[in-house]
Every structure is written in structure tokens, then in C-alpha cells.
Image: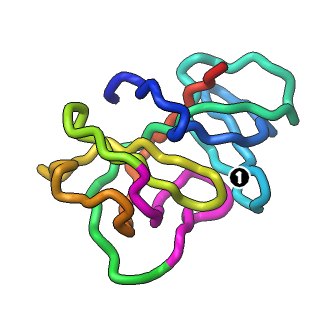
Amino acid sequence: MPPAPTTEQDITPGRLIGTEQGMIVLALFATDYQLNLCDEDEISIALDRPVKGRIYARARRMDLMESGGRFIEPAYGRPRRNQGTIAAVNLQANTITVACAGASMFICELGAKQSASEFPYGGLVGFDVERGARFELVG
């Protein structure tokens, strides 16, 4: 994955509700979403506490969408299919930050020989998430 961006706009707030063997369960504020994400840093804070961090994912293929809303499928478990609006484009790292459900922000590394330059800021995109999406705690 590319190095962590230095902006505050790509941070996802949530509540840590579970940990297990390199995985966390992150409950997104004001939603029913509970995401299972990899945790390479072995977060060691008390459960049911507010946390802030960055979600990194690799998109199998990203497509511009004509219509629809912002969502993460499934609502419980490992993210597999997401849709949202483009909040930032990093041409050097070839990543796109996508605002999905609630206040979640996914920093997506593009695959399938795609370039971040193909996607306009504010555009609606859909993508499949490869296994291994991870959470990096900040602050």
C-alpha cells in the first residue's frame, strides 16, 4: 500500500468493538455497519472506545457509476463491494479516496491497470474490494 496521506479528510471515525488475530471490528458512527479489517499494528486499546484511522483497500476494478448511493456490502464483515463519491485523487500513489457509507473513507489502491487520472473528483464510483483491507490507527 502507498504511504499514509497527511490530510485529515481521509480519516474514518468509528468505535472499536472487537479484535481477533490481526483483525478488528470497526463500528461506523451513526450507521449499522461493522467492518472486519486487518490490523497490522495490533491495536491495544480498550474495546467500545471511539477511534480514528485510515482504511486502506485495493480495488479489483473501479468503475464510474451513473446513479446510486454510498454503501458498503456487506454491512457486517469484510468489505467486498463499495460505492461512493471520490473525495481525493493522489496521482503519485495512484490512489483514490472514496467516501462510502456514513463517514467512512476508503483509500483505494487501483488495480487492473487503471490510473487515478481516469477518475474525476466528486464522481460516483463502485468497486470490489480485495481481501486484506486494513485499518491504521491515527492520533
Q: Is residue 95 above or below residue 6?
A: below
The answer to if 86 sits in the magenta stretch is yes
Residue furthest to the bottom: 67
Residue 37 or 7: which is nearer the viewer?
A: 7
Which region shows up in magenta?
Answer: 69-87
Q: Is residue 76 above or below residue 88?
A: below
Q: Quadrant of the C terminus?
A: top right
Residue 38 sits in quarter: top right
Q: Position of residue 103 (x, y in %)?
A: 64, 52
Residue 28 or 120: which is nearer the viewer?
A: 120
Q: Position of residue 119 (x, y in %)?
A: 24, 59
Q: Which residue is mark 1?
A: 34
Q: What kind of secondary structure does the magenta stretch mostly adopt?
A: strand
Q: Is residue 82 above or below residue 112?
A: below
Residue 84 or 36: which is nearer the viewer?
A: 84
> Relative to 60, is 124 on the left or the right?
right
> Relative to 116, is 113 on the left or the right?
left
Q: Residue at x 28, y 39 (%)?
A: 90
Q: Residue at x 51, y 35 (%)?
A: 134
Residue 123 sits in quarter: bottom left
Q: Residue at x 47, y 62 (%)?
A: 82
